[in-house]
Image (spheres, helix red, strand yellow):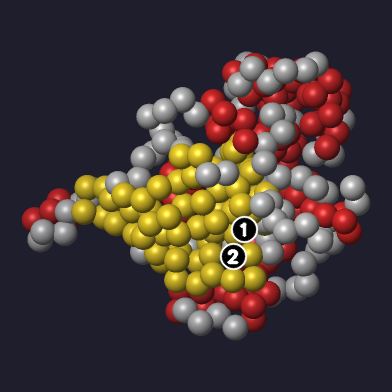
């Protein structure tokens, strides 16, 4: 089936979040004394991720991005609200092996996520083994490295022998290994230099556009989201304050938080082709 054919097929709803709330005790003793001892990290969020989506989740520090990401990954339980995947409940207290195969994660800093004592190929094999993914793992490792623009021969190297951009591509290859339907990326290019950031952003976009997984890209940088995503939600104080197509939101931001984030981006040139 060509991409032109798939464009006529309505997108399928994959991940749904309804009425998510998550609170934490405040870390500041002054807040507790004043009766403000609870932080509403996520405060009534609704979200839908469909096939083909490239969704940017944007906001400043403390807006709730990280908490929302942990909830969507099934790492934390919401105080209230629910998360479903293709209609099936997602709950951290249940066996989520099936969910881990379908929703994978790319961390901010691959230096902290890649075991320095494991060769690249062994790191990519980890989710295949842990999730009992069938098939020839060696072949799959080579395919994933090629898919992210790396030489399959790098499978025999250690992370310390790679550049920062190469390590982040390895982290992406590992996330792609189980053939997920969604990839959730946490500030996945912020730790890279400008050149590596551009290459990894282009790689992510190419993979997602080429009949790849849906993408949830968590970031504070509207410039990167502008290049990578087609839809954006803006968070402030645990709530979605703006939501829509990237071009519409960035050309006519209505909320002060979006306007402030936009002012932090020097220029917004047209999205770079993959």
Dot 1, how many residues are within 10 Å of its Cα: few (below 14), some (14-19), or many (20+)? Answer: many
Residue 30 visible from this viewpoint: no
* Residue 55: image tag: 1
- Mark 2 or 1, nearer chain start: 1
Residue 218 visible from this viewpoint: yes
Left/right placement of residue 146 relative to residue 254 reads right
* Residue 182: image tag: none
* Place of residue 228 in the rendered image (x, y in percent of width and height, measured from the top left): 71, 59
Please tell me which residue lies in front, 48 or 247.
48
Residue at 54% x, 70% y: name it: 243
* Place of residue 86 in the rendered image (x, y in percent of width and height, measured from the top left): 57, 44
Q: Is the residue 253 above or below the residue 216 in the image?
A: below
* Place of residue 223 in the rendered image (x, y in percent of width and height, measured from the top left): 65, 66
Q: Residue furthest left?
A: 33
Secondary structure of the residue carrying tag 1 is strand
Q: Is the residue 144 above or below the residue 6 in the image?
A: above
Separation (CA) of disc 2 from disc 1? 5 Å
The residue to which callout 2 is attached is 232
Asked whether disc 2 touches disc 1, contact meaning CB atoms under 8 Å apart, the reply is: yes
* Place of residue 162 in the rendered image (x, y in percent of width and height, measured from the top left): 74, 31
Question: How many numbered circles does the render carry?
Answer: 2
Secondary structure of the residue carrying tag 2 is strand
Residue at 40% x, 64% y: name it: 239
């Amino acid at each position: 089936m060509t991409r032109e054919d798939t464009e006529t097929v309505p997108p399928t709803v994959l991940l749904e979040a309804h009425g998510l709330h998550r609170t934490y005790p405040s870390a500041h003793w002054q807040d507790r004394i004043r009766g403000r001892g609870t932080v509403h990290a996520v405060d009534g969020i609704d979200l839908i991720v469909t096939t083909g989506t490239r969704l940017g989740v944007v906001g400043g520090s403390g807006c709730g991005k990280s908490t929302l990401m942990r909830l969507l990954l099934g790492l934390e339980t919401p105080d209230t609200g629910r998360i479903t995947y293709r209609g099936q409940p997602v709950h951290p207290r249940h066996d989520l092996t099936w969910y881990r195969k379908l929703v994978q994660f790319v961390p901010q800093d691959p230096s902290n996520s890649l075991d320095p004592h494991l060769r690249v190929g062994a790191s990519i094999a980890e989710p295949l083994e842990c999730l009992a993914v069938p098939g020839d793992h060696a072949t799959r490792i080579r395919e994933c490295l090629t898919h992210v623009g790396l030489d399959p021969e790098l499978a025999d190297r250690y992370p310390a022998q790679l550049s920062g951009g190469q390590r982040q591509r390895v982290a992406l290859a590992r996330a792609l290994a189980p053939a997920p339907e969604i990839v959730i990326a946490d500030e996945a290019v912020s730790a890279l230099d400008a050149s590596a950031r551009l290459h990894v952003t282009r790689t992510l976009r190419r993979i997602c556009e080429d009949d790849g997984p849906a993408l949830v890209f968590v970031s504070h940088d509207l410039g990167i989201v502008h290049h990578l995503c087609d839809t954006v939600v803006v968070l402030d104080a645990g709530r979605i304050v703006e939501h829509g197509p990237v071009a519409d939101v960035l050309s006519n931001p209505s909320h002060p938080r979006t306007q402030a984030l936009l002012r932090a981006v020097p220029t917004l040139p047209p999205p770079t082709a993959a």
